[in-house]
Image (tube, grey):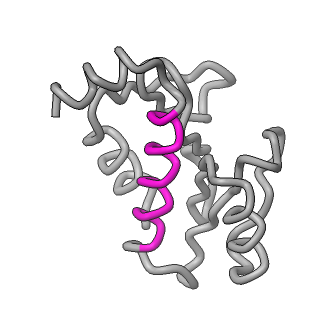
Amino acid sequence: MTFDELRDYCLNKPATTESFPFDETTLVFKVAGKMFALSDMEARPMRVSLKCEPERAVELRELHGAIQPAFHMNKTHWNTITSDGSLRDSFIRELIDHSYERVVAGLPKTVRENLATSR
C-alpha cells in the first residue's frame, strides 16, 4: 500500500478529517475529532499507526514482523504497520477499518448515530 492509497482509503470513511497537529510531515486522520490513523508522508516504506483492541494488538505483533508497537503512542492500543510487501493491502485496509471502528465505538451515542445517518 502506498501513502496515497492509505490517504484515499482513510478519507473515504464517514466524517474523516486530516490535519498536521504534530509536524509538517505526519498526517493524522480523525473521525469526529478523534484520531484513528497517523502516517509520516515521507516514510519509505509507508508506515501507518492504527488503534487496535489490546489483545489483538499483541497477537498481530507476534504473527507479523511488519507490525510493531507504535512509537510515541500508547503501546497497549496502538500498532505501527509497515507496508513492506509482507502484508496484503486488503489486510492493511482491514486494520484501518478496525481502528476506525474502535474509535467510533468510543464516541458518544449521539455522535455515533449522526455518523450512521450520514453514510
Residue depicted at x 73% and y 55%: 54
As drawn, 69 above or below 30: below
Residue depicted at x 62% and y 47%: 51
As drawn, 107 above or below 42: above
Coordinates of residue 90 in the picture (x, y in percent): 37, 73
In magenta segment, residue 117? no
Residue depicted at x 61% and y 44%: 40
**In the foreground, 25 or 1:** 1
Prevailing secondary structure of the magenta residues = helix
Farthest top residue in view: 110
**Tally of marks:** 0
Coordinates of residue 113 in the picture (x, y in percent): 28, 23
Quadrant of the rendered structure where residue 114 is?
Answer: top left
| Quadrant of the rendering where the C terminus is positioned | top left
Farthest front residue in view: 109
As drawn, 15 above or below 101: above
| Quadrant of the rendering where the N terminus is positioned | bottom left
**In the foreground, 47 or 69:** 69
Coordinates of residue 111 in the picture (x, y in percent): 36, 17
**In the foreground, 108 or 3:** 108
As drawn, 7 above or below 34: below
Q: State left or right for residue 95 relative to residue 115.
A: right
In magenta segment, residue 96? yes
Q: State left or right for residue 100 relative to residue 43.
A: left
Coordinates of residue 45 in the picture (x, y in percent): 60, 66
Please report the bounds of the magenta region as a residue range: 91-105
Residue depicted at x 78% and y 79%: 62
